[in-house]
Amino acid sequence: MSLDKNTVAKVANLARIRVEEKDLEPMASELNAILGWIEQLSEVNTDDVAPMTSVADMQLRWRHDEITDGGYQAEIVANAPSEEEGFFAVPKVIE
Amino acid sequence: MSDLTKLKIAEARDGLKDGKFSSRELIAAHLTAMDSARGMNAYITETLDKAVDGATQSDDRRAKGDVGKLEGIPLAIKDLFCTKGVLTTAASHILDGFKPQYESTVTTNLWNEGAVMLGKVNLDEFAMGSSNETSFYGNVVNPWRRTTDDQPLVPGGSSGGSASAVASNIAMGATGTDTGGSIRQPAAFTGIVGMKPTYGRCSRWGVVAFASSLDQAGPMTRSVQDAAIMLEAMCGFDPKDSTSVDMAVPNFEAALTGDIRGLKVGIPKEYRLDGISSEISALWEKGIEWLKNAGAEIVDISLPHTKYALPAYYIIAPAEASSNLARYDGVRFGLRVEGEDLDDMYSKTRGEGFGEEVKRRLLIGTYALSAGYYDAYYLKAQKVRARIAEDFKQAYKSVDVILTPTTPSAAFAFGEKGDDPLEMYLNDVFTVPASLAGLPGISVPAGLSADGLPLGLQILGRPFDEETVLRAAGVLEKAADFTATPTDWWRG
């Protein structure tokens, strides 16, 4: 699996990271070097191995579905680059 | 009074208790030392007023007999922990101006035990790096220099500011976080002790997330005893972190009995890498001798999938990061770069706000999770991770702890490994496997390289058996008798 310039552009778009046109090619070769090195994972026999999804042997806890927190709108928006009347403000989405 | 900064936490605790000095004096000595060490760039934000207020309050509490485990002790906090009302950057441009409205659980625990914050220390951007060269706030310099030249060296990473601050006596201890070695590797590079506890010991709540199945906070100190004291104050069950483990916190300091007779110490053959420096091999041999002389039984073990830990890590960590870092969108906090529309604003904000290494990892992670590649990369890596964890499980049937070097080399110069990301990643070859398995590990300074740089040995333990890890580390520390300190060139 080798990444070309177009795939990097596509992935960058998926990640919502602007990458300049001139940087796509060097980025592709860097990512290919890393992915090439990662290919060695295919040497490991993982037939019948369940993927590790929990680090410690533990079960996730249950909790009651109840409100335990909240009621501080001003704090929530305190760090917003743009805020209007207690809401996060973003560029217009709907025409 | 400047020698107050040279005290270890345990010594300062006794001095404060005996009334030899106050917390205010202790803090003042540190603030003066910090002032003269700015060239090291260890701190991103110094919280002078908070430190003085904190010390005054601590002295008041002590006068009333209300004394916590870290009462009056000055600490540096890695700038990945959210601290209420204090700039928290993760060393990234994208968190410009972010002042959390809440306090992380780990720092809350520290303040509840009386600790006093000196400031927020530098790191690799979002903790992604092994040399502290990816920080938006500039490189941190290692207080150590080679005896052969004056070239500035990296402190390791990602907890490079924490490591340099503790090693140069401008903090008595510091918090670090370890995802693939970010506590243990910089501790080794700067001649201090760094401990990553078992995944689940310390709450991740309020710590800026990198890779959530790997991130763990831990202490960085100048002795094993100090690490035990600080860890005890940091950890504990937290319902706000779904992977926090509901277990009683042991008295870690009491585990330092100095007695390891009969302890079974595993030596994994797969860690004898080709190309490892002969100094590191020799130090490892010494460590084996020290533990054997103290009555431990040395057992050769095999961890067959060691070689695959790094490549598995470089899928899993970036994949989790690509999900965690999706929150930086220019809407709720930090940097916003305006665009033509919402999508354009996202892309521009993230394109400008993230540094090169972070972008590289986010793209790898996004690719590994994208349709058509998920099974080949992410699922495969998670299966390999299961095999690595199984290796350790098997090994711990015959041994109690495992002894390895912490790093394949001593600290290096800036730019020396900057060109090739893969070469940089290899720094963590000895620390990443235990991270993937969620195991506790500690790095103890154990000797000097031929050109005078500190080298560390690592002890790994069973899940939630930090006590045995600390006990073995204490014996190693005593035998190594590492007393070297860097010359304080930064005072000019």
Image (cartoon, coloured by chain):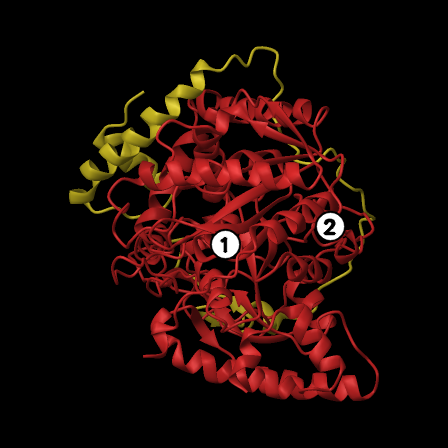
Chain colours: A yellow, B red
User: Vertically, is B179 above or below A55?
Assistant: below
Quarter that holds the C terminus of chain B: bottom left
Image location (x, y in percent) of residue B194: 56, 53
Task: Mark 1 or mark 2: name the one nearer the start of the chain.
Answer: 1
**Quadrant location of the N terminus of chain B in the rendered image:** bottom right
Identify the subunit bearing mark 1.
B
- Label placed on residue B260: none
**Looking at the image, residue B39 lies above or below residue B24:** above
Q: Measuring 60% from the left and 42% from the top, which residue is drawn there?
A: B290
Badge 2 local density, few (<14 within 10 Å), some, or many (20+)? some
Whether residue A2 is visible, yes or no, is yes
Of tags 1 and 2, the one toward the viewer is 2
Q: Is residue B22 above or below residue B454?
A: below
Task: Report whether B300 appears left or right of B468.
Answer: left
Q: Is residue A91 visible?
A: no
Where residue B450 appears, x then y in whole percent? 35, 49
Give how far across and how far down residue B468 sits, in percent.
Answer: 73, 43
Mark 2 lies on a secondary structure that is loop
Name the residue located 19 percent from the left edge and 43 percent from the top edge.
A23
Q: Quadrant of residue B164?
A: bottom left
Asked if residue B386 lies left or right of residue B450, the reply is right
Q: Residue at x 30, y 34 (%)?
A: A31
Q: Is residue B386 left or right of residue B356?
A: right
Considering only vertical position in the picture, is B223 above or below B407?
Answer: below
Circle 1 residue: B187
Give the letter of the chain under mark 2.
B
Q: Position of residue A46 (x, y in %)?
A: 55, 14
Nearest the eye: B184 or B5: B5
Q: Amino acid at mark 2?
A: Gly
Q: Nearer the viewer, residue A53 or B254?
A: B254
Reading the image, the residue beneath label 2 is B258
User: At 37% from the left edge and 76% from the top edge, which residue is drawn?
Assistant: B38
